[in-house]
Image (tube, rainbow, N blue to C red):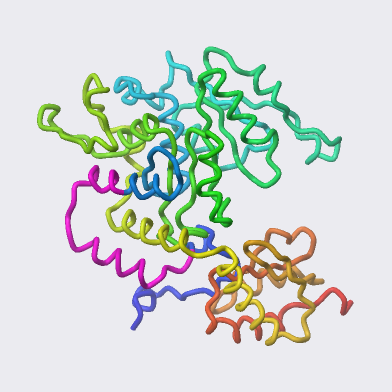
Amino acid sequence: MSVYAALGVTPIINAKGSSTRVSGGLLSPVVTTAMAEAAGLCVDMAELQAAASRVIARITGAEAGVVTSGAAAGLLLGAAACLARLHPARMAQLPDAAGMPNEIIVVRSQRNAYDHAVRAAGARLVEVGLPDRYAGAGIRDAELWEIAAAITPATAAILYVLTPHSQPPLAEVVALAHRHQLPVLVDAAAQLPPAANLRALPATGADLVAFSGGKAINGPQGSGILCGRRDLIMSAILQNLDLDLDWNSWNPPAGLIEKQLLPGLPTHGIGRSAKVGKETIVGLLTALELFAAEADEDRTARHLQILDQLLQLTPDLAFTLRPGPVPLLALRAANARAALAELQNGNPAIHLDPSALADGILRINPTCLRPEDLPLLASRLRAVVIPSSEL
């Protein structure tokens, strides 16, 4: 009996992709083997995170990095680092950020539910810009001068949520921030692939960059990466680790924590609830090495092979291929909402990508599909979906 059957849980067919709601991606046997080995031994967590920092720095080109319990945890830790820096008293005070610079500027069109993690650290978000290009009222979005005008002595950082259409350009925002001695925290959770972004984003000078580990990297679902400036990574990890230690006997790894820069040992910080286990750290590092070693075109070719097999099983459905680093199949359906619900509530449940549902389009994401899923997926699509051309 499988572990899920023993729990009374039925695995789904995941054509949505590696989102948290559908439990993330599929781990390579190499990753699960590494995690199982890590689980059988005990280590000093600071030493393990210092080793992780070396791996992340080598792959990203950043000064340092830590494994987090997801990209949102990276935003929480990154925001806390920007607020408290290397002041143990400020670390102990958060999320009460009174008496310290506590405003983080963000472009209004970049706001999303995940910036809750930034606010949870104690920051007050200051919005700038009017997203006319999204509202249909014009072509403009926030401009650099608007960010500059919002900078005050209360400003602690700038939050930049990266998408292919984010404005102003990240490099320009970084240059502006650095003229004011302010750090930039980048939410790049879903900006992989291409794998080149692992190095390209820190190369802009961005001070902290958060990536998801459980999506394209195919690491453990509850994992992420925060990489960037060494002093800010030090602040982040100090607010995350178990620090119930005696100051005199505490000997942290110098590559991650410089003890001489601290006036004393911080108490357990705001990031303590976002702790990450040894198994997750090892699994993420293993997956990151595999992801960085695979060419984007080879990864895309694997996804296209899955989609091609599905197309062969559904000759009567008029799919459209949407090319990209992660190619998708799109199907316009007359009953899109009803079909999505019926598939999702079936047994086994079949989850599709609903991102274009408002336009009557169902999408198939291949990243979490297995070859053995395809016959049932094809059969159910053919039985449930009414192509719009038929009406």
Which residue is more in the foreground, 249 or 286? 286
Task: Identify the image quadrant of the C terminus.
Answer: bottom right
Task: Identify the image quadrant of the N terminus.
Answer: bottom left
The location of residue 150, given as percent across then percent down, is 64, 18
The location of residue 235, given as percent across then percent down, is 35, 30
Tell me what residue is drawn at x 30 percent, y 33 percent. Answer: 238
Which residue is more in the foreground, 15 or 27? 27
- Quadrant of residue 89 in the image? top left
Tell me what residue is drawn at x 43 percent, y 50 percent. Answer: 59
Tell me what residue is drawn at x 48 percent, y 62 percent. Answer: 24
Main SS of the magenta part reads: helix
In the picture provided, is 380 more to the left or to the right than 368? right
Residue segment shown in magenta: 25-51
Tell me what residue is drawn at x 53 percent, y 22 percent. Answer: 103
Total marks placed: 0
In the picture provided, is 168 more to the left or to the right than 153? right
Is 27 covered by the magenta stretch? yes
- Quadrant of residue 66 in the image? top left
The location of residue 111, given as percent across then percent down, is 63, 37
Vertical order, 251 against 152 (above or below)? below
Vertical order, 144 against 385 (above or below)? above
- Quadrant of residue 91 in the image? top left
Is 363 covered by the magenta stretch? no
